[in-house]
Amino acid sequence: MHARLCAEKDVMETRHVVCAVIEHDQRILAAKRLEPVNGKYWEFPGGKVEENEDATQALVREISEELDITLESVWPLEKTRVTLPDGAIELEAFGTHLPQGQTPKLHVHSEFMWVSYDQLFDVDWLDADAAIMQAVAMSWGDLFYGSRGC
C-alpha cells in the first residue's frame, strides 16, 4: 500500500505545462501574471496539459483561452524542468508568430509587453520561463528568422 501511495504521489508531483514564445515585429510577448510566484510575475503564456491532450493541442487551447489568439503554426523550442517545494514542473516551450490580424486580449494576465532581444535579460521572469528565455536568447535569429520566416 505504501509503495502505491508513494508512486501516486510522484506522478502527481510533476505537472506538464506548455508555453508559447510568440514573436511579432522582432519582439516576443511576455505576460504578467495576476498573482506572483516566488515574487516574480512575468511568463510566457500557456498552461497545463490536460488528460487526452498532447502538448501542441494544449498550447493551442491555452493560448486561445488566455489571449484570444488562434495559433496557426508552432514548432518545438525547448524543454526544462523546475523543482518547486510542492512538486516539479516540466515546461515545454513552442515558438510561433503572432498570426496576422490578431491582437492579444488578456483574460488571465494583468498586462503584456513586447520584449526585444536587448531587453530579454531585463525582465523578471518566473524561474522556469527564465530557462526558456535563455535558450531563446542563444538562438534568437534561427528561431524566428531562419527557416521559419518573419
Image (spheres, grey):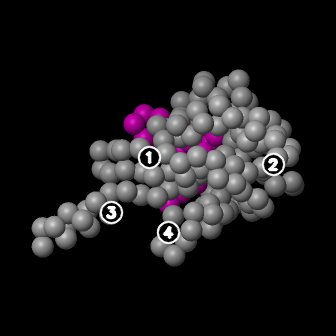
Q: How many marks?
A: 4
**Mark nearer the N terminus (4 vs 3):** 3
Q: Which mark is residue 109?
A: none
State left or right for residue 100 relative to residue 18. right
Front residue of 54 and 84: 54
Instruction: Read off the magenta span.
Output: 30-48
**Mark nearer the N terminus (2 vs 4):** 4
- Specify whether residue 117 is in view: yes
Q: Which mark is residue 50?
A: 4
**Mark nearer the N terminus (1 vs 3):** 3
Q: Which mark is residue 148?
A: 2
**Can you identify the residue that label 3 sits on?**
12
| Residue 83, position as x, y percentages in the image | 36, 44
| Residue 33, position as x, y percentages in the image | 53, 44
Secondary element under disc 3, as helix, strand or loop, is helix
**Can you identify the residue that label 1 sits on?**
81
Residue found at the very far bottom of the displayed protein? 52
Above/below status of 81 relative to 41: below
**Mark nearer the N terminus (3 vs 2):** 3
Look at label 2 and name its amino acid. Answer: Arg
Q: Residue at x 42, y 58 (%)?
A: 15
Residues under numbered marks 1 and 3 in contact, where contact means CB atoms less than 8 Å apart: no
